[in-house]
Image (cartoon, grey):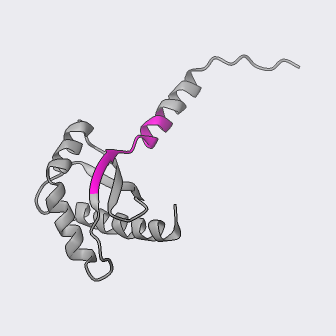
Amino acid sequence: MTMRQQKYGRLIQKELSDIFLRDKRGIIGKAFITIAEVRMSPDLSSAKVYLSMTLAKDKKAVLTQISEHKSEIRKALGDRIRNQARIVPNLSFYIDEVEENAQRMDELIKSLNIPKDEK
């Protein structure tokens, strides 16, 4: 990933985080969402947004709800970055599973029955 993609991705991440924090339209309900990562396409026209959801009982339903309001979210993003960027990227939302995978690994490691090394 180029420096330009990373810089633009950080801008998108910061602004989307703020948009979700101030969610006035009630798109995300009671779920606490953080933007885990934003991956930009080489031409900066599309962004893959990875969401970490805590307190969300049904993450897929929250993701569907966010995806249904994608155009509203993109417009809000455009209003915020129009002075800094020429293109408002198309947004694709995904559930970030890094946290769940880490918890699963911790549970697996704790459940291992490793005999003591006898010297």
Which residue is rendered at x = 37% and y = 65% of the image? 44
Which residue is rendered at x = 43% and y = 62% of the image? 42
Tell me which segment is drawn in magenta.
Answer: 91-103
The single residue placed furthest to the left in the displayed view is: 25
Which residue is rendered at x = 18% and y = 55% of the image? 70
| Left or right of 2, for residue 52 | left
Which residue is rendered at x = 29% and y = 49% of the image? 93
Quarter of the image where one finds residue 71: bottom left
Quarter of the image where one finds residue 23: bottom left
In the rendered image, the quadrant that contains the C terminus is: top right
The single residue placed furthest to the bottom in the displayed view is: 83
- State the image coordinates of residue 69 (x, y, percent, origin top left): 14, 54
Q: Is residue 4 magenta?
A: no
Quarter of the image where one finds residue 82: bottom left
Q: Is residue 6 above or below residue 37?
A: below
Q: Is residue 116 above or below residue 10?
A: above
Q: Nearer the viewer, residue 45 or 49?
A: 45
| Left or right of 6, for residue 16 | left
The single residue placed furthest to the right in the displayed view is: 119
Q: How many marks?
A: 0
Q: Nearer the viewer, residue 116 or 65?
A: 65
